[in-house]
Amino acid sequence: MILAAAHTASEGLHYTVLALYIVAFGMFIYGLMGLTGPKTAVRGNWIAAVGMLLAVAATLLQVYNDGAVSDDGHGRVDVPAINWILIAVGLVLGVVLGVPPALKTKMTAMPQLVALFNGVGGGTVALIAWAEASETNGFLNFHGVEPASPMVVGSLIAAIIGSISFWGSLVAFSKLQEVMPKGLEKFATGNAKLFQLANMVLLIVSIALAVVMGVRAATNDGSSIWWMVGLLIAAGIMGLFVVLPIGGADMPVVISLLNAMTGLSAAAAGIALDNTALIVAGMIVGASGSILTNLMAKAMNRSIPAIVFGAFGGGDAAAGPVGDAGGTVKSTSAADAAIQMAYANQVIVVPGYGLAVAQAQHTVKEMASLLEEKGVEVKYAIHPVAGRMPGHMNVLLAEADVEYDAMKEMDDVNGEFGRTDVAIVIGANDVTNPAARNDPSSPIHGMPILNVDQARSTIVLKRSMSTGYAGIDNPLFYADGTSMLFGDAKKSVESVIEELKGL
C-alpha cells in the first residue's frame, strides 16, 4: 500500500512539474516580448527571471520525483538524496558573482558584461557535457549507451558549441574591455587566413573526437572521459581562434552570434539531460540570437561568414591615418551650435559610442527639452549597430527618459534628413560615414548608414579627429555643411544648454 500510494503521489508530482514548466515557458516568451522596447524591458526581464525560478524549482521536483518510488524488496520507498547544501552553495556563488557586476557596471561597459555572462552560460553547458561523460557521474554516463542516443549526441554537441562560445566570449570581452595585448590583436587580424586554416583543422579534430566517443560509448570503454577532455580543448582553442581575428567593428555582431550559440548548446544539453525547460529556454535564446545576428549582418550589408572569416576594424587604438578624406575641418562654438538649433524646424540627434563614454544621455535629453520648448521638433536616429552591442543607444536614451516614439530606426529616419535643418552627431563615426555610399574602395562600402550628410547643417561632437572603431577616416567631417564642436560630449552639450537658456 505504501508503494502504491507513493506511485500515486509521484504521478501527481509529475503533472505538477509539467504544469510549472508550461507556466515557465509562457513567462519566458512573454518576458522576451517585453524586451522589444525600453518601456517594457525591465518588466519583461523580471517576468523572465520569475519564469526561470519556476523552471529551476520544477527541475528539482523532477529530480526528486524520478527516483522517489522504488521498492527495496521489503515494500519500503527509497527517496533519492539531493545535495541541497551543494545547490545552496551554487546559488550563493551565483548571486555573489553575478549581482555586483550587474549593479556596478556602467552602460559603456555593458557589452563586455553581456559577453562575459554569455560566456559563463556556454562554459556551464560544456561542464554539463563533461559531467555526462564522466564515469563518476551519479546520473548518466556514456558507458554502455547507444552511440546515437540523445544523451550521447546532445552531450557531444553541447560540449563543442558550449566550449567555443565560452572561450570566444572571453576573447570578445577582452577586446571590448581593451585588455587584450595590442600585439596579439594586430597579429591575429593580420593573419586571419592562418587562423581560418587552424579553425578548419580544429573543427575536423573536434568532430573526429566526438565520433570516437560515440563509438566507444557502446563498448563500456572507461577512457571516454579523456576523449571528452581532448574534445573540450580542441573546441576551446577553436573558440579562441574564431574570435581573435575578428575586428572591433564586427564585435556587436559577434556578441549576438555567440549568444545564439550558447542558447543552442543549452538546448543540446537539455536533450542530453531530457530536461524540457533547458530545451525550450535554449531554443528561445538560440532562435532570438540567430534572428538578431542576421538582422545586424544585413544592417552592415555583410554576410555572417564574411564577418566570422574576415578581419574588419581593429578598435580605437588601431585607428588609421587621419585626413585621408581631404578637405578642411571647420570648428564651431557652443554659441553657434545653440543658435543653429534654436532657430531650426527639426533637429535630429545621432547618438554613438562617444555619447555612452561621456554619459551624456541626460544632458542631451535636457537640451532636447529646451529645443522642444522653443517649438523645435527633435528626433533621435538609431543605427542598428551604433555603439558596441544591439540596442545600446536605445537603452542609454531610455535611461534618460527619452520617449520611445522619438527614437527612430535607420530605415524610418533616413528619409527625414533631407528636410532636417540640423543633424547633431554625438560620438558616432562609422555609421555616418558617407564613404559607405560613395567610395567603392572603402572597407565599409555598401554598409547602410544614416544619411546625416543630407541635412542642411551637421554639427559633430568629438574629442578629436581620431577615427572610429572601424579604423577609417570619415569624409563627413570635411563636408561643406559640417562643423566640429570639439571636447567631451557631456561638457559640450552642457555648454550648448547654457547658450540655449540665454536665447
Image (cartoon, helix red, strand yellow):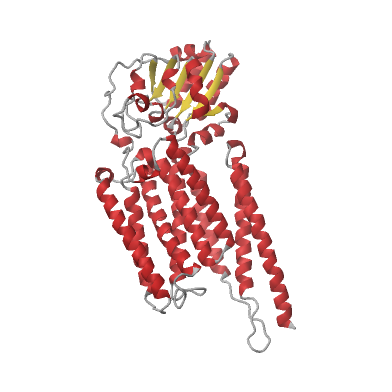
Number of callouts = 0
Q: Tell me if 347 is positioned left or right of 302 in this view.
A: right
Q: Residue 38 or 294: which is nearer the viewer?
A: 294
Q: Residue furthest front?
A: 148
Percent across and percent down for residue 190 are: 24, 43
Q: Residue at x 50, y 44 (%)?
A: 291
Residue 102 visible in the displayed image: yes
- Figure quadrant of residue 458: top left
Q: Is residue 306 left or right of residue 10?
A: left
The spot of residue 180 in percent (x, y) is 32, 46
Image position of 251 (left or right of 272): left
Quadrant that contains the N terminus: bottom right
Seen as rendered, the residue at the extreme bottom is 74
Q: Nearer the viewer, residue 18 or 471?
A: 18
Q: Is residue 184 above or below residue 222?
A: above
Confirm whether residue 126 shows in the render. Answer: no
Q: Position of residue 375 (x, y in %)?
A: 59, 14
Whether residue 162 is situated above or below residue 299 in the rendered picture = below
Residue 34 lies, in percent from the top left, at: 61, 42
